[in-house]
């Protein structure tokens, strides 16, 4: 006797339409039954017709797969007994183009008080990178504590300008633009230049090194401006697919793992309580509303946790808890470790060429161009993640190129003002969009105002800059992981039952972590990276490329995705979903999210 299963298919699109089909799973199926069911489905004009026709073409196809291929939200119930099995299987999480579990999207705004607090929270979060990069590089350049705080002020000031430009005229996504670690390798190459190392006076060496970095940034920014405004990056983005970009976006978060728990471990008495408190408030108490209707623990977990743990660390420092600890522990834990407050002026307004006229060197500029390329790739992944966390569509090629172009102008401003590093999208602030469930553009614009304001008031800015770094590292553990998971979520649009897709995803993720780790280990153990020729600019260029996890991941994933069984795998790669977001007019929602303000689209029409 033939084994039979009875399926009840319900669709949210048409709840009233219920189609019952008896599927004969024997080797000789009854096609007449399929034809009859197919005609019935056609009359209903329901997505169920696709299921029936797919099953008709192959009697071995599973109904679950047919439902998935049909699109939309479906619930499939299996009814039967004996050897046919029984029970229910609910497909309650279909692929979704936009996240639904957020309170405010890119164009909606919280109340003003809430908006200002959220903006200040973004400012506090971006301080970690803005303080760490100058604190690491300025002493190597020969600078003093006064030079360090001045560089921090300049970086904050230019970051505020770049964030405002990007939110108004760039991608228009709610992203913070701040200092980038991608530029550290070429900057170290400049710092170690023999002509600069021979300068005996430390302050003069600092000034000459800063001018050399400025010149390299100015030249390298031209590459990013050309790639952006010529639409070259938009053309290259046509090779992207959900399968190819998922590892890249994932590595934007995972590739920063060394700034997470390893830094927390440098001061566990501060880092561990911070991490546990952040998870507890933002996840377990997120629905608790002690004041009115605002879920304060979900909206402001960073502000609350940083304030509490910062006060706790001040008490530990004042009580002498670190007086007899190793220097490394004191540098990580103490709130008075860097003399930032005493060295900061009350008021200082950064201005272009404040360190003197930039100097230009071809080798320095070529090495810096590698950091620009890495920054473009990392920012692309961050933009894709931010669009999803802001309930927007993926930025089309034109918008992506526009954002890269404005980011190039941001690097030009970095060079003119002398921030000591280039700029890119702040990954931690992208993660904060998801943690607070607020993707409002206005929040980021006001946050840019905080950056500019506090950068000119040196003493006040230095107070916030004295927050111990393990506090930020605990935040990074959650926020970088959230960005990584957003990247992995793009795999929902692909067929992960395909061995081809599994190989591409796994290899891209593994090599994206393994290759940079090899380069980093070699750099730490031997004092130089694996590429070590007599041409310093060549070493800096290649080592910068291969020390970036998202860059390595993109090279592997995009190459394999566009060379392995391309024609046969269009649907498996997720291209039917992705292709409509390639052009500005491919989806009606793009105009809502990415149209320029002040009616500027009339003068700069989408291409």
Image (spheres, rainbow, N blue to C red):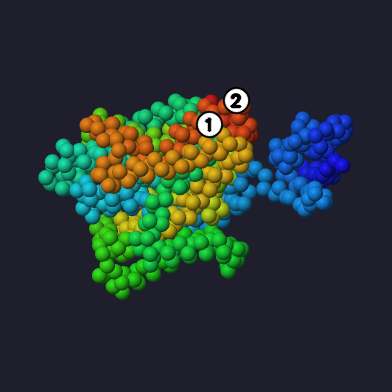
Residue nearest the viewer, comparing 433 with 153: 433
Specify the quadrant of the image occupied by residue 62.
top right
> Is the residue under label 1 in contact with that under label 2 (CB below 8 Å)?
no
Residue nearest the viewer, comparing 497 with 369: 497
The answer to whether residue 45 of the structure is visible from this angle is no
Horizontal and vertical percent for residue 192?
21, 41
> In which quadrant will I find the N terminus?
top right
Specify the quadrant of the image occupied by residue 497.
top right
* Mark 2 or mark 1: whose residue is earlier in sequence: 1
Q: Is residue 477 above or below residue 511?
A: below
Specify the quadrant of the image occupied by residue 356.
top left
Q: Residues within 10 Å of mark 2 (few under 14, many from 20)?
A: few
In percent of the image, x 25 and y 44: which residue is there?
A: 526
Q: Residue 397 vs residue 326: left or right?
A: right
Horizontal and vertical percent for residue 522?
30, 43
Q: Residue 477 vs residue 464: left or right?
A: right
Residue nearest the viewer, comparing 391 with 83: 83
Disc tally is: 2
In percent of the image, x 52 and y 64: which residue is there?
A: 280
Horizontal and vertical percent for residue 535?
24, 31
- Identify the secondary structure beneath mark 1: helix
Horizontal and vertical percent for residue 124?
41, 56
Q: Is residue 410 above or below residue 257?
A: above
Q: Is residue 548 above or below residue 118?
A: above
Q: Which residue is mark 1?
A: 561
Of all residues, the one furthest to the bottom in this rendering is 319
User: Disc 2 and disc 1: Cα gap in Å?
Assistant: 11 Å
Q: Which residue is mark 2?
A: 567
């Amino acid at each position: 006797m033939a084994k039979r299963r009875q399926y009840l298919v319900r669709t949210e699109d048409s709840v009233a339409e219920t189609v019952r089909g008896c599927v004969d799973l024997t080797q000789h199926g009854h096609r007449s039954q399929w034809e009859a069911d197919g005609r019935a489905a056609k009359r209903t004009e329901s997505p169920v017709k696709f299921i029936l026709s797919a099953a008709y073409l192959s009697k071995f196809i599973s109904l679950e797969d047919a439902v998935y291929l049909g699109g939309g939200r479906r619930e499939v119930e299996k009814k039967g007994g004996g050897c046919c099995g029984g029970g229910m299987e609910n497909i309650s999480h279909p692929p979704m183009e936009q996240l639904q579990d957020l309170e405010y999207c890119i164009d909606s705004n919280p109340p003003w008080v809430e908006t200002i607090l959220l903006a200040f929270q973004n400012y506090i979060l971006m301080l970690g990178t803005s303080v760490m990069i100058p604190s690491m590089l300025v002493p190597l350049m020969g600078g003093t504590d006064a030079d360090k705080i001045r560089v921090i002020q300049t970086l904050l000031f230019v970051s505020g300008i770049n964030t405002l430009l990007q939110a108004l005229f760039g991608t228009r996504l709610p992203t913070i633009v701040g200092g980038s670690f991608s530029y550290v390798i070429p900057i170290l190459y400049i710092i170690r230049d023999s002509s600069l190392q021979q300068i005996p006076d430390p302050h003069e060496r600092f000034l000459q090194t800063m001018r050399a970095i400025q010149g390299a940034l100015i030249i390298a920014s031209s590459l990013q401006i050309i790639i952006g405004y010529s639409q070259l990056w938009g053309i290259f983005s046509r090779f992207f697919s959900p399968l190819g970009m998922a590892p890249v976006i994932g590595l934007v978060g995972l590739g920063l793992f060394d700034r997470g728990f390893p830094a927390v471990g440098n001061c566990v008495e501060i880092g561990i309580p911070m991490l546990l408190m952040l998870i507890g408030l933002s996840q377990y108490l997120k629905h608790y509303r002690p004041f009115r209707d605002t879920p304060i623990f979900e909206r402001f977990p960073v502000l609350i946790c940083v304030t509490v743990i910062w006060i706790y660390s001040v008490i530990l420092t004042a009580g002498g808890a670190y007086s007899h600890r190793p220097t490394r522990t004191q540098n990580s834990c103490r709130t008075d470790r860097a003399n930032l407050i005493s060295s900061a002026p009350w008021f200082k307004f950064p201005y272009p060429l404040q360190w003197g006229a930039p100097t230009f060197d071809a080798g320095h500029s070529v090495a810096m161009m590698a950091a620009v390329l890495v920054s473009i790739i990392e920012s692309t992944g961050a933009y894709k993640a931010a669009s999803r966390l802001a309930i927007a569509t993926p930025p089309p090629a034109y918008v992506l190129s526009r954002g890269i172009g404005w980011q190039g102008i941001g690097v030009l401003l970095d060079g003119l003002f002398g921030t000591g590093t280039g700029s890119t999208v702040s990954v931690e602030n992208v993660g904060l969009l998801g943690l607070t469930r607020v993707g409002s553009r206005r929040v980021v614009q006001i946050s840019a105002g905080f950056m500019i304001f506090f950068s000119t008031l040196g003493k006040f800015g230095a107070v916030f800059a004295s927050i111990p770094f393990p506090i930020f590292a605990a935040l990074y553990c959650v926020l970088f992981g959230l960005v990584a998971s957003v990247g992995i979520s793009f795999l929902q649009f692909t067929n992960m039952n395909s061995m081809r897709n599994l190989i591409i995803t796994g290899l891209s993720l593994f090599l994206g972590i393994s290759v940079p780790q090899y380069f980093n280990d070699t750099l730490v153990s031997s004092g130089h990276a694996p590429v070590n020729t007599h041409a310093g600019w060549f070493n800096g260029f290649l080592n910068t490329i291969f020390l970036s996890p998202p860059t390595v991941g993109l090279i592997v994933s995009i190459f394999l995705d566009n060379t392995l069984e391309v024609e046969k795998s269009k649907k498996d790669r997720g291209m039917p979903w992705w292709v409509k977001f390639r052009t500005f007019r491919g989806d009606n929602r793009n105009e809502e999210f990415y149209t320029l303000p002040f009616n500027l689209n009339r003068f700069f029409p989408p291409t």
